[in-house]
Image (cartoon, rainbow, N blue to C red):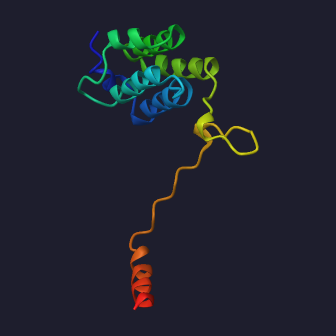
Amino acid sequence: MDLRSLRVGFRDDAQRSRAQRVIHDRLADDRLQDECRYLMKFWWQLSMSYQEVTIGELREHLGADKLRAVEALIKAIGQTPEDIEEWITRAVGAFPLIHDRGNSRRDGRSAPPLANRRKPSKPVRGSSKPRRRALKRSRR
C-alpha cells in the first residue's frame, strides 16, 4: 500500500493534527527507540506527499498493538473523516499518555505527560540587543 496519499484523507488540518497528536503523545514512546523512530516517520507521512515510511517498515518495526492501531488509522483515512474521529476516540481510550521518564524530577516523581508540557516561549525580537550593548559598555 502506498502511504503518500494519506495527507489528503483528512477533513482538515485540525483533524490531521489531532491524529498526529495521538501518535506522538500515546504511541511513540522514546524508550523504545526503533519503534518510536518509525512511528515518527509515520507521523510525518500524514503531512507529506513523498514517501517517508512504508507499510513494510511499519510491520517490521512496530509492536503488534501499535501496528494494529496504525493500520486501523490507515484504513479510516481511506474511508471517511468520521471514521478518523472514531479512531482518535478509540486510540485515546486504548493507549495511555506517555510520560517522559528521561526527565524525572529529583523527588522521584515523574515529569508531567508530554501532552501537558508547556511549549517554550519564543524570545522577544530584538530583546537581546540592548543587553549586549550594555555588556560591551561595562567591559570598557
Residue at 56% across / 26% down in the picture?
26
- Residue nearer the viewer, 95 or 104: 104
Image position of 66 (left or right of 8): right
**Rendered location of residue 44, percent (x, y):** 36, 30
Q: Which image quadrant is residue 135 in?
A: bottom left
Residue at 63% across / 33% down in the picture?
99
- Residue nearer the viewer, 33 or 77: 33
Q: Which image quadrant is residue 50 in?
A: top left
Query: Is 105 situated above or below 80?
Result: below
**Rendered location of residue 37, percent (x, y):** 41, 25
Query: Is 133 situated above or below 90?
Result: below
* Residue 79 seen in render: no
Image position of 19 (left or right of 103): left
**Rendered location of residue 78, percent (x, y):** 36, 14
Q: Give the residue at the far right of this rendering.
A: 107
Residue at 66% across / 40% down in the picture?
104
* Residue 120 seen in render: yes
Residue at 45% across / 30% down in the picture?
20
- Residue nearer the viewer, 107 or 119: 107
Image position of 85 (left or right of 99): left
Image position of 128 (left or right of 115): left
Q: Give the residue at the far left of this rendering.
A: 50
